[in-house]
Structure formats: C-alpha cells, structure tokens
Image (spheres, rainbow, N blue to C red):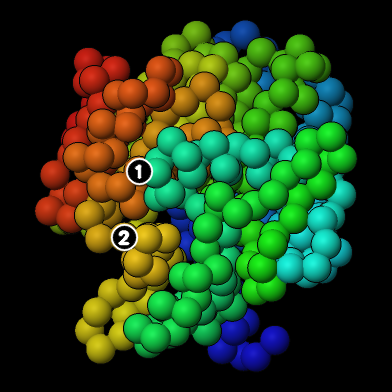
Amino acid sequence: MTFRKAVEVLAVIIILALIVFAVFRILNPEDSGSGIQRFSKTELLMDTVFEIAVFTEDEAEGNRLLREAFSEVRMLEKTLSRFISGSEVDNINQAAGENPVEISSDSLQVIKEGIYLGEVSQGSFDITIAPLMDLWGFSTGEQRVPTPEEIEETLLLIDYTEVDINEQRNTVYLPREGMSLDLGGIAKGYIVDRIIQYLESQDVETAFVNAGGDIRVIGNRPDGTPWRIGIRSPRNREGQDLIAVIPISDQAVVTSGDYERFFTSDGIRYHHILDPSHGYPAAEAISVSIVARECMAADGLSTAIFVLGPQKGIELLESLPGIEGIIIDTEEKVHVSSGLQDIVEIR
C-alpha cells in the first residue's frame, strides 16, 4: 500500500467514525432505570464502521450476542464483497463471459434484490455498475475524471438485465467478459438485516445495528420511546449538524449523500453515486434518506432515488407501500414523502 493510499484509507476511517458518532448522539437512549444495560461493539468491516448494540441485564449474554453477531458479519463480508479474493461475488466476476458460478442462498438473495431494485427504478440502481466505479477510481482510491470515450466504452458493460440467474442450480452468469457485479449498494443493508434476524431469534427486544449510516433497530428504546435517527445536514451550513430527525420503531433508515465519497478536479466536485444511464455522478440530489422495514430495501432505494432526483424519486416512493423518504435537492430544499410529513422533525 502506498503512503498516499494509506493516508486516504485512514481519512475514510476517521470520517466514517465521525458519521457514526453523529448518529449515535441521536440513538443513545436515556437510562430507563430498569437495570437494563447497553452492550456494544464496533469494528471496521465492509469498508465502513459497524456498530452493534444490545440492551440486556446480563453482561455475559450481551457479550455473547455481540461476539456471534460480528462473526456473522465477517462471514457475510467474505461472501458478498467483490474486493475479497475468492468471495462468491469475486468468483462471478472472474468467470464473466466464461461460465456460470454456483453461489450460496445469501448471494442469490442479494443479487435477486438488486435486479428487482433495478426494475422498479428503471435502471437507476444497477448491480453491474462495478466497471464504472473502477473507471472513476472510487474502488481503488485513485480517483480521476475519465474521458467521454472511456465512459462510452464502459457503459457497454453496465446492464443489470443481462445478469443470468438459474435458481434451480443456484448459479449466476455474467455473459460478457469485462462485466462485474458490485453489491456494495445493498450488501451492507442485507448484512444488517441478517444481524437483526439473529438478535430477534435470541429474543432480544431492544437493539440497533449501524453500518456506517445503514441503521436498523429492534423495538423501542429502553425507556419505551421510539428511536430518534438524525439525518446529517449535507452541507453543514453555519454549524448545523442535523437537518432532520426521524422517530422509528422496528424499522431501518439509510442515507446516501454526495458528501460521503468525492474528489475535486479543476474546481468541480465529483461524487461516487454514478448514474448508470450516462456514467457521470447523479446531479439532482445531495442527500436521500429512506425509511423501510428492511435495511436492504432502504439501502438500495437510497441510491436509486438519489439518481432519480426529487420529482421521480418522490413518485417512486409514493408507489411503494411501507417505504418513505427524505430527498434534499441541489438547492438544499427538503422533499418529504407523504407518510413522513406528520412525524419527521425538520430543523
């Protein structure tokens, strides 16, 4: 690893830790006085900060739950990350244009969800976006602005409809050499959902998982009130830390913003949320927060709706039952779906 790369990685870790801290100030519950304690653990996984917190009276039980939950996260990362050699996603990408690859039910479920989100968003979410991410350097840390010719050529490899799934054989096939999957837009959400499922199977009644801003909670806070999730102000004007607060119970909240990963070239700011239709960063929103029952759906939709922009994004939200959202456009105007208007606190 070069010195420059090491510095960039350290900077990302620090930024992610600060994001988690900002959210935690909202999540942190008051002491209920019931003897229930908070047990939590944080690790750097999936290129982000994972925090899991459970609330119980039994310290040994709390530590066991955290230990087993993080073991599950590490196993799923080795399955779903395209950056880990020998992962199932890496195997699919290496075999592009050659042969189908047999995969686990975890990978199959995430890939199927990715294709579904591509369909409902009319291609604004595309799990075959990896070649574009690599071209811009968002995958490598060596960011640059590609030439129009490079983008045009790479766009030929971006098409989620070409992903060939055989559910009888549990195989996935990318039909053209150079195609590759990137499940980063939904894999974190899937892992969060799996951890929540595990904790619920252990009769946990109060907990939260925060994967770098992909948040899902179990129940209410120990004092019986809903969790309060803070939505970061994208531009942090005049020291304003949060732009909105959303109360949730047994739900997930995921935010995608143009401030998460970006670089500046010739005075122009380029962020990592690329529009699969033209290959450049999406240009109509600066932040999108999605509230849903499951984190994987919220994760993918936050990206899809960011690409769609406020008008089409709100239209999509209103068409999906049980899904709500907040979109902040490039003029910092806040757009709220109908199901959140009476409960969200805009600051």
Instruction: Compare marks 2 and 1 and give the one earlier in the sequence.
Output: 2
Going by the numbered disc 1, the residue's amino acid type is Ile
Give the distance between the C-alpha atoms of the residues marked 2 and 1, in whole angstroms. Answer: 10 Å
Name the mark on residue 305.
Answer: 1
Q: Is residue 145 left or right of residue 191?
A: left
Residue at 68% over, 26% down: 196
Circle 1: element type: helix
Q: Is residue 324 visible?
A: yes
Q: Position of residue 307 (x, y in %)?
A: 34, 52
- Give whichever of 24, 259 is nearer the camera: 259
Q: Is residue 46 above or below residue 51?
A: below
**Any mark on residue 282, and which?**
2
Q: Residues within 10 Å of mark 2 (few under 14, many from 20)?
A: many
At x 50%, y 75%, the residue is 154
Pinpoint residue 294: horizontal percent, then vertical percent: 56, 27
Q: How many marks?
A: 2
Neighbourhood count class around disc 1 (C-alpha, 10 Å): few under 14, some 14–19, many 20 upward: many
Q: Is residue 183 above or below residue 311?
A: below
Give the percent coordinates (x, y) of residue 47: 63, 60
Q: Between 126 and 207, which is closer to the camera in this rendering?
A: 126
Q: Is residue 194 left or right of residue 153?
A: right
SS category of the residue bearing label 2: loop
Quarter of the image where the C terminus is located: top left
Instruction: Specify whether residue 10 is in view.
Output: no
Q: Give how far across and how far down residue 35 sits, in percent.
A: 67, 13
Q: Which residue corresponds to the image point at 83% horizontal and 62% vertical from the top-left?
A: 99
Q: Amino acid at mark 2?
A: Ala
Quarter containing the N terminus? bottom right
Closer to the camera, 259 or 306? 306
Question: In front: 324, or 159?
Answer: 159
Check the image and report above or below for 19 versus 273. Answer: above
